[in-house]
Image (cartoon, helix red, strand yellow):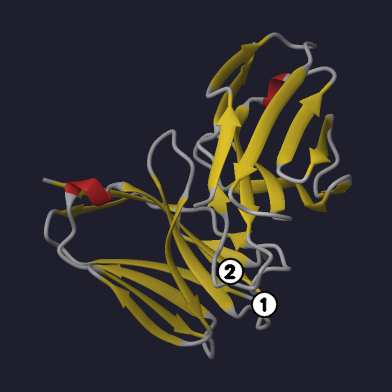
């Protein structure tokens, strides 16, 4: 079993829809949770960073962590064609010393 | 501000040829540095990471090697490339100061071994 599981998609939704992207994990020691966005042929860029359980909102993006279920989500409201990218979840045990474990990424396409 | 530079952007190399990819970081000291490979349509595979000059940890045994000759310089090398070495190579750094930051990635190198 992989430490982090993520549905590869592809996921295609119409412009303006709410998008829900999810990951599950098996290591209960993970405390730091991240979402990266990767455009085609580019390096991933950090989108959201949360610590422990709860929600964090940044504009149209909301990251949600449920440690009891070992489940994290990223919600995108009012999705735009520019949101079309691959989204990777990632997590680590500590803030700086430990390695980050990545999901395999979900490819998202927003139809105009 | 911190920046990460990675070059070249694309590379086509014949099987059996050597490889050298370079990554440098500016605006930070003593960063953790990482080399990842991403095969087409697949996730990120950690190849090497370094917590200091001359300190290299290998995650996947293969014909690649890494070196960190200076604090903010990380080099990925191979003496003889294989077809299976094709992929998207990404360098990344992470702040060791305890801030709430994940990795910052470079722009990547697309390597095609022919």
Q: Residue at x 73, y 38 (%)?
A: B74
Q: SS at mark 2? A: strand
Q: Residue at x 28, y 47 (%)?
A: A84
The image's mark for residue A27 is 1
Q: Are marks 1 and 2 on the same chain?
A: yes
User: Which corner quadrant of the image does residue B91 belong to?
Assistant: top right
Task: Note whether B98 is above or below B114 in the view shown.
Answer: below
Residue A15 position within the rendered picture, expressed as x and y whole percent measured from the top left: 12, 54
Q: SS at mark 1? A: loop
Task: Note whether B99 is above or below B15 in the view shown.
Answer: below
User: Which corner quadrant of the image does residue A17 belong to?
Assistant: bottom left
Instruction: Please identify the residue farthest to the bottom as the structure is shown.
Output: A68
User: In this orientation, does residue B37 appear?
Assistant: no
Residue A87 position within the rendered picture, expressed as x and y whole percent measured from the top left: 41, 55
In three-dimensional space, the C-alpha distance between marks 1 and 2, rounded to whole angstroms, equals 10 Å
Q: Residues at badges 1 and 2 in contact (C-beta under 8 Å)? A: yes
Residue A67 position within the rendered picture, expressed as x and y whole percent measured from the top left: 53, 86
- Label 2 belongs to which residue? A91
| Mark found first going from the N terminus, 1 or 2 | 1
Locate residue A6 relative to residue B44 in the image: left or right.
Answer: left
Circle 2 Cα neighbour tier, 10 Å, few/some/many (<14 / 14–19 / ≥20): many
Residue B16 position within the rendered picture, expressed as x and y whole percent measured from the top left: 80, 11
Circle 1 Cα neighbour tier, 10 Å, few/some/many (<14 / 14–19 / ≥20): some
């Amino acid at each position: 079993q992989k430490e982090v599981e993520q549905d590869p998609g592809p996921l295609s939704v119409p412009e303006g829809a709410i998008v829900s992207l999810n990951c599950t994990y098996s290591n209960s020691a993970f405390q730091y949770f991240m979402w990266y966005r990767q455009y085609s042929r580019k390096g991933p860029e950090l989108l959201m960073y949360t610590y422990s359980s709860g929600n964090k909102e940044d504009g149209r993006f909301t990251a949600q962590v449920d440690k009891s279920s070992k489940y994290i989500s990223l919600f995108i409201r009012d999705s735009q064609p520019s949101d079309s990218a691959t989204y990777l979840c990632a997590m680590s045990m500590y803030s700086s010393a430990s390695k980050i474990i990545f999901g395999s990424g979900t490819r998202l396409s927003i139809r105009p | 501000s911190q920046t990460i530079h990675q070059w070249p952007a694309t590379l086509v190399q014949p099987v059996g040829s050597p490889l050298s990819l370079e990554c440098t970081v500016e605006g930070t000291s003593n960063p953790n540095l990482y080399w990842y490979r991403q095969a087409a349509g697949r996730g990120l595979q950690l190849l090497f990471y370094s917590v200091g000059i001359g300190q290299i940890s290998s995650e996947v045994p293969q014909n690649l090697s890494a070196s960190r000759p200076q604090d903010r310089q990380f080099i990925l090398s191979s003496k003889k490339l294989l077809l299976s070495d094709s992929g998207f190579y990404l360098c990344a750094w992470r702040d060791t100061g305890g801030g709430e930051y994940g990795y910052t990635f470079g722009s990547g190198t697309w390597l095609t071994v022919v």
